[in-house]
Amino acid sequence: MKPSIIILLLLIPFFSFSQKNGATMVTSKQEAKEIKAIKKFQKDLNEEYLNPKETPLRGDNFTNFKKHPFFPIDLKYRVRAKFVKTENPVPFDLPTSSGKTKSYQEFGKATFELDGKPYTLTVYQSLDLMKTEKYKDHLFLPFRDVTNTKETYGGGKYMDLKIPEGNSIILDFNQSYHPYCAYNAYDYNCPIVPEENKLPVEIRAGVMYEDIYHH
């Protein structure tokens, strides 16, 4: 057997095959794992909004809800960012949609590339949540991008993160979601995305927005 054939046979177990637009595509096991995590995020988010005890939806919005619209999963929007932790962060009050404030501190800066261009987002930590055992390692990443008001909520989107162990952090925009205020502005008090986290590029990933909600 030719050496090239032997190498190909050895590589096959590390790849799976899928169909996209009629073409066969090769997906590595790592990519398959990442896609599985994104699908779980989508499933969990839909279940949350279908659960009357957890959903922010009210009235007809809840009755008519079936599932969220999502951008097609695209691992281009799952990026490894260089992470620099902020030394001696100063607590501050972040304005919210209701005109009130919530207490946060800057936790660090995440710098990544998208289509060959560098971008930086600031990651925050809630002073209230960090006091609880469940959320002590929880980080908050609010951001805006060019899809806002067109295909996503005008106020931007959020992403939940964990404190990284090293000097890098994974930002998976496929797992970004809208604040509750996008669906119910009367009952919720959502942090407004800081100006420094406004991206001058489209992030076509995560939850899309159907402007059918009374907000």
Image: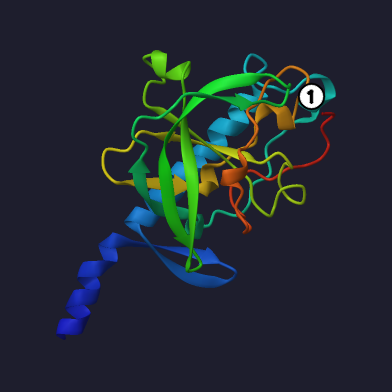
| Quarter location, residue 87 | top left
Residue neighbourhood size for the residue with mark 1, other residues' Cα within 10 Å, grouped as few (<14), some (14–19), many (≥20): few
Where residue 132 appears, as percent x and y from the top left, is 40, 13
Identify which residue is drawn at 67% across, 27% down.
Answer: 180
Nearest the viewer among 201 and 27 is 201
Identify which residue is drawn at 43% across, 35% down.
Answer: 161
Where residue 110 appears, as percent x and y from the top left, is 42, 47
Total number of numbered labels? 1
Q: Which residue is mark 1?
A: 63
Q: Is residue 1 visible?
A: no
Where residue 19 appears, as percent x and y from the top left, is 52, 65
What SS does tag 1 mark? helix
Question: Horizontal placement of 64 versus 33: left or right?
Answer: right
Where residue 168 appears, as percent x and y from the top left, is 32, 47
| Quarter location, residue 203 | bottom right
Type of the residue with mark 1: Thr
Position of residue 26 relative to residue 210, above or below, is below
Nearest the viewer among 54 and 186 is 186
Position of residue 90 relative to residue 132, above or below, is below
Position of residue 159 relative to residue 100, above or below, is below
Nearest the viewer among 36 and 109 is 109
Question: Horizontal placement of 70 versus 10: left or right?
Answer: right
Identify which residue is drawn at 43% across, 56% down.
Answer: 112
Q: Quadrant of the C terminus?
A: top right
Q: Quadrant of the N terminus?
A: bottom left
Q: How is the image coloured?
A: rainbow
